[in-house]
Amino acid sequence: QVQLVESGGGSVQAGGFLRLSCVASGRSFDGLGWYRQAPGKQRELVADISREGRTRYLDSVQGRFAISRDNARKSVYLQMNSLKPEDTAVYLCNAYVADMGSRYDWWGQGTQVTVSS
């Protein structure tokens, strides 16, 4: 059974930092990543990382956030530095498998990140 369990959210002041962790168990995954959803806004990809270590970032977090994964620990991490109030959202861990042109996604329950000015 696939389970994605996040930890590390919280409340910080602008300029602060947080580190999110997610353990993705139950099978192996091609990609691991983090999405976020703020109230009234669409869910957006923050960063993801392939099994081979290729990364993608949302433009607005490039240079401030860093994603990494530990395949042995089945974990993905998001180091978030220089946080801004606009980073406030629920952050969701994502894991996916790509197979024959289709993509299968699994989601964590989400962890709240609140950045105050």
Image (tube, rainbow, N blue to C red):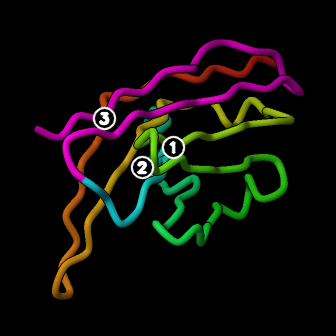
Q: Residue at x 62, y 40 (%)?
A: 78
- CB contact under 8 Å: marks 2 and 3: no
Q: Position of residue 6 (x, y in %)?
A: 42, 27
Up the image or down, 62 lies above or below 9; here it is below
Q: Which residue is labeled 3 in the image? A: 4
Side of 27 where 23 appears, left or right: right
Labels 1 and 2: the sequence-earlier one: 2
Quadrant location of the N terminus? Answer: top left
Question: Residue flagged by tag 3: what amino acid is it?
Answer: Leu
Membership of 4 in magenta stretch? yes
Q: Which residue is labeled 1 in the image? A: 76
Say few, some or many: other residues with alpha carbon within 10 Å of mark 1 (under 14 / 14 to 19 / 20 or more). many
The residue range painted magenta reads 1-27
Labels 2 and 3: the sequence-earlier one: 3
Labels 3 and 1: the sequence-earlier one: 3
Side of 38 where 19 appears, left or right: right
Q: Nearer the viewer, residue 90 or 5?
A: 5
Q: Where is residue 107 in the image (x, y as percent from the top left)?
A: 28, 42
Q: Which residue is labeled 2 in the image? A: 43
Front disc: 1 or 2: 1
Q: Which residue is drawn at 31% across and 59% down?
A: 29
Question: Residue flagged by tag 2: what amino acid is it?
Answer: Arg
Label 3: which secondary element = strand
Q: Nearer the viewer, residue 107 or 43?
A: 107
